[in-house]
Amino acid sequence: DVKVTQSSRYLVKRTGEKVFLECVQDMDHENMFWYRQDPGLGLRLIYFSYDVKMKEKGDIPEGYSVSREKKERFSLILESASTNQTSMYLCASSYRGETQYFGPGTRLLVL
Amino acid sequence: QQQVKQSPQSLIVQKGGISIINCAYENTAFDYFPWYQQFPGKGPALLIAIRPDVSEKKEGRFTISFNKSAKQFSLHIMDSQPGDSATYFCAASIGTGANNLFFGTGTRLTVIP
């Protein structure tokens, strides 16, 4: 079974803090994705990566950056957290053009 | 701009009934249409998917109907069960697979016993 794990299920941070969200997949997938999920808006793509050290902007990259130093790990970074970044963050991975497998999500609250 | 429009936002169905969720898209380049199911506290999981070369795909109680000319597709859940209560997302992508998925806004389904 494909397993996508996210470092935290719940996270509370203060405005202005730097926040790291980590995602690890165990299936040697090339592609990894970060989404945010908000009620009434569905899932929106923040960034994705096709390979180590490669990254592409998604639909809403502003205020976020990513890092992929190893194939199995994809990190989402909030350089200076703001209250409008309070959300559920979902990581996913896929093998080339196949199904995306999602992690359980990290619910982030920025105070 | 929402690339994939989904309705209804919420749906309540009696046990044994049929649940129907609809999605519409504009981009005719989309060629992969998956449905994801999400239970509370979990990430979305692929439920069923269709490509535009067929008009219907059935897996157990779940059926996707696809209307290419109308640019619409829908999920039908036959004999709905309380265990089907979840949020359902339709999605679409361009290319040979599931990369760059554009998601609908989700439908919260509640099946009443």
Image (tube, rainbow, N blue to C red):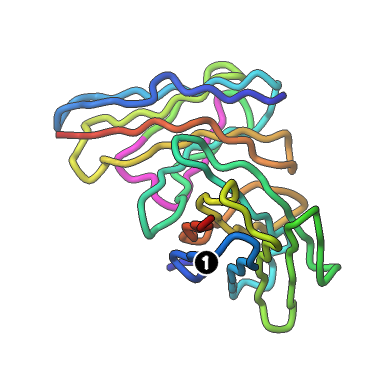
Residue A28: percent from the left, percent from the top? 70, 21
How many residues crowd mark 1 within 10 Å: few (<14), some (14–19), many (20+)?
some
Please identify the dominant SS of the magenta region. loop
**Label 1: which residue?**
B3
User: In the picture, residue B93 is in which quadrant?
Assistant: bottom right
Query: On the picture, is B7 further left or further right than A11?
Result: right
Left or right of A32 in this view: B48: right
Chain assignment, label 1: B
**SS of the residue under disc 1:** loop
Name the residue: 55% across, 55% down.
B88
x and y, in percent, of residue B53 in the image: 85, 68
Would you say residue A40 sits in the magenta stretch?
Answer: no
Query: Residue shown at 15%/28% (left/top)?
Result: A14
Looking at the image, which residue sits at the far bottom?
Answer: B69
Extent of the magenta region: A53-64
Q: Can you tell which quarter of the image residue B70 is in?
A: bottom right
Residue B61 position in % (x across, y down): 75, 57
Quarter of the image where one finds residue B68: bottom right
Give yes or no for residue A63 being in the magenta stretch. Answer: yes
In the image, residue A8 above or below residue A58: above
From the viewer's side, name the closer residue of B13 and B42: B13
- Amino acid, disc 1: Gln
Q: Position of residue A54 (x, y in %)?
A: 56, 31
- Decide: is B86 above or below A22: below
Q: Please name the residue shown 34% across and 37% down the image.
A: A64
In the image, taking residue B79 as reference, residue A25 lies left or right, namely left
Q: Quadrant of the N terminus of chain A?
A: top right
